């Protein structure tokens, strides 16, 4: 297996650049990826892309390549910097990779693999490739998504419904003042030992907590839209901080959407620490990025809604000990998909990253390769 550095360039005309440096200068977007090339030729390429990070260091793409699958790990223009991220522009980046794979490398079939945050991206891409409807970002900036090359099949693995849904289920509703996160409602502060509500949580508290989470997200969105409407002239964008966004009830109560996950833990470590830390969901954002990726009422990257527009074969995989993706999400995508040929599977005991689980990683690879063989993607 030989890793190959990939450089893709595609043109873009925009009012301003969201990212630093050469990634979007001079009217061209420059993208970097890694292609894993097994010795055996293949007509099929498995394409992985996450909106905000790179995936070549993760176990699944490499393990698939070691099993003989040609794999491309795509970095978007926003790789490792999701503060200004526009989902519609990530779709354009993904489209550039797929078009290159077909036209320059000669692959005949594309398997679009949506892992973690790449799941809703994959759904958004394929839905627009099959039935293009989007002509503008949620902030109203024009975007052209027609002419995307359709994938031939999809895998949705250890992936959540959308960044916006994930945030709405994780944001801390105890925050009373966005400019002073120390002002909190103790009744809703699940990390405060003096909070009167303790696990296992009552259905009434769960309902109240979820309601207050949505209210906070929507207040933030209303503020974003109001400020965006006030910006004039050369001031077209602004960055901001949203504190305390890692307070999903599932982190502390294993009875909420139960699976085999480790209680009192999340994929970022100790939940209370992550909630206050600098790397939580949506912690840093621009106004346009908030509407595109974090606003539950505005984002186009809504996994279930997009899934209703896809028709290609789909394999949806749940990791039963996933400490990042909530238990219902993979099944929800499977059930929403319009695909006539769709399969749902569970890897019992698998965590999000298969850390220290080589036998479960092999099980996941065998599942994917077996399904690909059934779909005649390994010819």
Image (cartoon, helix red, strand yellow):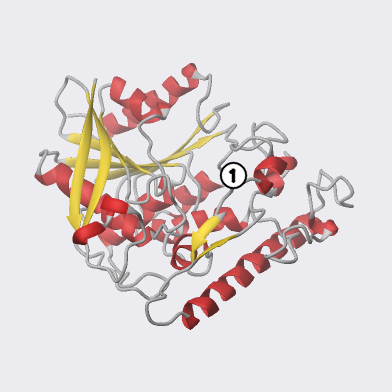
Tell me if residue 91 comes above or below residue 321 in the rendering: below
| Residue 182 found in image quarter | bottom right
Tell me if residue 68 comes above or below residue 133 in the rendering: above
- In depth, the one of 182 and 364 nearer the eye is 182
What residue sits 42% from the left and 73% below the top?
139
Q: Secondary structure at mark 1?
A: loop
Q: Residue furthest top?
A: 359
Label 1 Cα neighbours within 10 Å, binned few <14 / some 14-19 / many ≥20: many
Number of labels in the image equals 1
Please indicate whether residue 102 sits to the left or right of residue 70 in the image. Answer: left
Residue 96 image offset from top left, x and y in percent: 21, 51
Residue 19 image offset from top left, x and y in percent: 35, 56
Q: Quadrant of the N terminus?
A: top left
- In depth, the one of 255 and 60 nearer the eye is 60
- In depth, the one of 47 and 379 nearer the eye is 47
Please indicate whether residue 221 sits to the left or right of residue 17 in the image. Answer: right
Q: Quadrant of the C terminus?
A: top left
Tell me if residue 54 comes above or below residue 15 in the rendering: above
Residue 42 image offset from top left, x and y in percent: 16, 29
The residue tagged 1 is: 326
Residue 226 image offset from top left, x and y in percent: 54, 79
What residue sits 60% from the left and 47% below the top?
278
- Please indicate, yes or no, whether residue 151 appears anywhere in the rendered image: no
| Residue 12 found in image quarter | bottom left
What residue sits 47% from the left and 56% below the top?
83
Please indicate whether residue 34 sits to the left or right of residue 351 in the image. Answer: left
What residue sits 59% from the left and 42% below the top?
327
- Please indicate, yes or no, whether residue 296 appears anywhere in the rendered image: yes
């Amino acid at each position: 297996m030989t890793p190959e550095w990939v450089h893709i360039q595609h043109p873009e005309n925009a009012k301003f650049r969201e990212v630093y440096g050469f990634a979007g200068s001079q009217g061209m977007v420059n993208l970097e990826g890694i292609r894993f090339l097994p010795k055996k030729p293949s007509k099929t390429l498995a394409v992985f892309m996450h909106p905000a990070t790179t995936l070549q260091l993760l176990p699944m793409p490499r393990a698939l390549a070691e099993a003989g699958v040609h794999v491309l790990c795509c970095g978007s223009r926003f790789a490792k910097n999701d503060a200004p991220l526009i989902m519609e522009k990530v779709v354009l980046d993904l489209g550039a990779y797929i078009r290159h794979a077909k036209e320059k490398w000669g692959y005949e079939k594309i398997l679009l693999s949506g892992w973690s945050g790449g799941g809703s991206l994959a759904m958004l891409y394929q839905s627009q490739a099959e039935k293009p409807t989007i002509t503008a970002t949620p902030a109203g900036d024009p975007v052209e998504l027609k002419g995307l090359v359709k994938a031939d099949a999809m895998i949705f693995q250890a992936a959540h419904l959308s960044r916006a849904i994930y945030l709405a289920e994780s944001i801390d509703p105890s925050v009373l003042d966005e400019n002073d996160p120390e002002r909190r409602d103790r009744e809703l502060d699940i990390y405060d030992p003096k909070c009167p509500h303790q696990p296992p949580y009552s259905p009434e508290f769960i309902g109240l907590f979820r309601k207050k989470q949505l209210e906070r997200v929507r207040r933030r969105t209303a503020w974003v839209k109001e400020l965006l409407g006030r910006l004039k002239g050369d001031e077209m964008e602004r960055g901001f901080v949203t504190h305390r966004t890692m307070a999903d009830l599932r982190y502390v109560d294993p009875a909420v959407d139960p699976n085999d996950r480790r209680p009192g833990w999340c994929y970022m470590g100790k939940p209370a620490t992550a909630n206050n830390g600098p790397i939580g969901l949506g912690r840093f954002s621009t106004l346009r990025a908030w509407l595109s990726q974090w606003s539950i009422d505005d984002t186009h990257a809504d996994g279930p809604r997009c899934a209703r527009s896809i028709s290609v074969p789909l394999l949806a995989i749940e990791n039963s000990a996933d400490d990042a993706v909530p238990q219902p999400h993979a099944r929800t995508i499977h059930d929403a998909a319009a695909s006539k040929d769709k399969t749902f599977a569970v890897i019992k005991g698998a965590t999000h990253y298969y850390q220290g689980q080589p036998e479960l990683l092999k099980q996941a690879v065998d599942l994917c390769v077996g399904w690909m063989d059934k779909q005649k993607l390994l010819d």
